[in-house]
Image (cartoon, grey):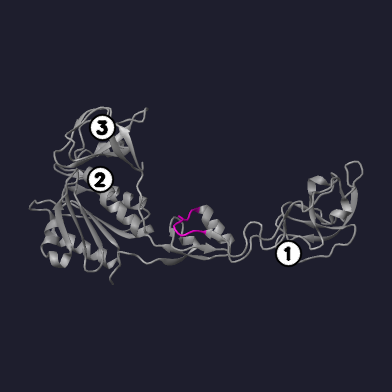
Amino acid sequence: MATQTEKAPVRLPLQQALGLVLAEDVHTTVALPGFDNSAMDGFAVRREDVLDATSEAPVRLRVVADIPAGSGENPPLGPGECARIMTGSPVPGDADAVVPFEKTVQGVDISDEAATEVEVIEVPKPGANIRLAGEDAPAGALVGRTGDRLGARILSGIAAAGVAEVTVHARPRVAVITTGDEVMAPGSALEYGQIFDSNTTLVASLVAECDAEVAVQEHVGDGPREFADALARAVEAEVDVIVTTGGVSVGAFDVVRLTFEGDPEVSGVSFDKVAMQPGKPQGFGKLPTGQLVFALPGNPVSVFTSFEAFVKPTLSILATGEFSRTESSAIAVERWRTPPGRMQFMPVRFSQAGEVVRATSGGSGSHLVSRLSAAEAIALVPAEVEEVQPGDRLKIWEILP
């Protein structure tokens, strides 16, 4: 089954919509609240009956009805009569105020169903403690706008409006395939020449931070059959995007490039050198079955900067229809060299004064894994700059922890 790179909105129950983005407006199906109801535990009264009430001369009323929350009753109230009422309960049509329990003579227990009388010690204001029908929102009011991200508060408002399902942008489904015979799972016993796999965790976590779903997560060696089989499983899983790491350069064992370049017309994926550092070798394309493919380099810093530059905007557009990046600028407080003719993506951290320094010593080398964990942002150094000088103002991409 072919997938679409522009995902159509889907209709989902509220319980499955947390974190997704609305694809159409949501309106209330009823007025909120739908009826006049009590804002307090107390007594629904005819205000004219208690206009003389004081603490020295309480007004005694007969309790002729009990109205719990959820009651559909509308008991009539005559002169000198009231109804015991709970918070959220419908207010009788004859009542025009609710006297809270605290404004009655002490010793009268509102929970005592045997109580037949109550003494009111204070005159309530007109409409006191009554929530009027529709005062929160009239029927048809807007409670969710297209483009809103559905957090707990918005979902609660939509539920209160009587809406059970919403139309949202579906999370993109992503396959993460890391490659390399030398790559071993964390916790393994390493032999000489082997390294731990950090790319699987890195890419899968970055995908999740983009509100996308990691539908397939695999590590394969450098055998062409292994990689081809992993691709087939990703396609079978009906993912929207495939992200690979490693095997994209010009080496004899770069399985990702060799697999796709074996038949580029069929694969739809091509490879090139991008004027950036780190992350020069890149592959991108679209399979005949519809999946977008991002073939990223294998070194972790290259993977990170490439994901930020290319994959993150794509996943955001697939998930929400738009993309925006948090950009700022900051002053460099140290000197470092830059690669000639290539834009440098330098992991940096902020000083207490808000200036930036390299996240660790050594540069932006693609193998410097410790630089990633120390980074708070990425500084973009233009290709024409040969050396960053203290005092230079740099564009900054802010990143998640």
- Per the model, the C-alpha gap separating discs 2 and 3 is 16 Å
Callouts 2 and 1 close, C-beta under 8 Å: no
The tag earlier along the polypeptide, 2 or 3, is 2
Question: Which residue position holds label 3?
Answer: 360
Q: Is mark 2 on a helix, strand or loop?
A: helix
* Residue 95, percent from left and from top: 81, 59
Question: Which residue position holds label 1?
Answer: 71
* Residue 10, percent from left and from top: 42, 67
Question: Which residue position holds label 2?
Answer: 305
Residue at image location 15% in from the left, 51% down from the top: 181
245 vs 23, nearest the viewer: 23
Image: magenta residue range: 144-151
Q: Residues within 10 Å of mark 3 (few under 14, many from 20)?
A: some
- Per the model, the C-alpha gap separating discs 2 and 1 is 60 Å
Asked if the stretch drawn in magenta spans residue 73, the answer is no
* Residue 237, percent from left and from top: 29, 65
Which residue type does callout 1 highlight?
Ser
